[in-house]
Image (cartoon, rainbow, N blue to C red):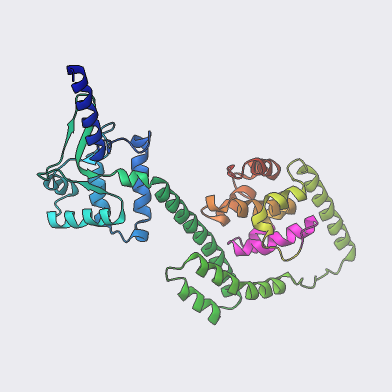
Amino acid sequence: MGQSGRRSTIMAFTKLSLQAFGGNDDTPATPTYETDIWAVFRALRDTRDLFGLRPGHLHTLQAMLSFLKAGHGHTVFASNEEICRRIGGVDERTLRRHIDRFIELGFMKRNDSPNRKRYRVRSSDGHSISYGLSLSPLLTRASELLSAAQEQENARRDCMFLRKQILSRLACLEQADSASDLVRDLRKTLRRKLTLFDYRTVLELLEGPCSQLSTAVDQQEATKLPANDGQTVRHQSKSEEERKDLEGEIDTETPNLQTLTATCDQATSFATSSIVSWDDAERHARTLAPMIGIHENTFDKAASRIGPRKAACAIFIILQVGNRIRDFAAYFHSITLGRRQNDFNPKRLLESLAHSPAAPA
């Protein structure tokens, strides 16, 4: 066999040996490793309870990730002593326990050299073998972790939204009956850490009492007429004219009723009957307002200031984009009675929501 033949055989044998020992283990799992690796870490941090991880485990992983350099693979070559120092003085026994836990969960892999040292060797043609703690399995499961973190965040936001509704309904019931046993018991329940299912169950328990309360509130009181009937007729006529003038001014900002109900499906989902007229929409908005912390008097003032249709639209829109509003009552006051009153245009907002559900309110 000639010299060139022997060289080809040796190179082929070397490449085969490197593949057998995982020589390409340091190939990045994703081309966007530099930007994604910390996102994956944050996802694992947020979902650590699902894997039985404690803060100490995450401190260890964070320290190990800090040893990685962009373009140099995903293997940590630092010694246990150096890793312990970077963590902040944790003992080596604890470090080994944390590493074993990550290996058990499939987030890390140990590639030991014959002398158990951590290093990398390269061949003349660019292949390498890395001996150390490989974090490639963590990046391989990036999709799983990011998905779990998003589901957990969605559940957290939904729980917060339902909790706000429950607290608003409890406040209404407490105002009607300060000694209510139901209110007292449910407030105790809310002190515990509840699941999304628990919050929905509590909300369903409040539907009956709140509907009875709404029926009692909706009953109109008898109007006391002054002695001068002519003065009353003139006052009613003047009020009606002012209402028509106000509604005429906001026609350019009031959306179509069908557009409102179709776009704001969060609000319409609470309706017990079909919303076929603006009177239905206004009535439904008045029912929803106390449930999200907006006092009846505040809604009345808003309806008087900007018109009942526009005030009803505000309630519908707030429920639709509620997960981005911290304080429903303050936001409602701002767009109907406060500094943002002149900028509030329900028609334009609904057009934005119809084209993009994530459009800002």
State the residue at coordinates (80%, 56%): 277
Please state if 321 lies on the left or on the right of 29 as rendered: right
Residue 326 place in picture, x, y as percent: 51, 53
Q: Is residue 124 above or below residue 338?
A: above
The segment highlighted magenta reads 274-300
State the residue at coordinates (85%, 62%): 232
State the residue at coordinates (65%, 62%): 288
Q: Is residue 259 magenta?
A: no
**Residue reaching furthest left?**
115
Please identify the quarter of the rendering in which residue 230 is found. bottom right
Please state if 341 lies on the left or on the right of 151 as rendered: right
State the residue at coordinates (50%, 64%): 196
Please state if 75 lies on the left or on the right of 264 as rendered: left
Residue 179 visible in the current orientation: no
Q: Is residue 121 above or below residue 177?
A: above
- Quadrant, the N terminus: top left
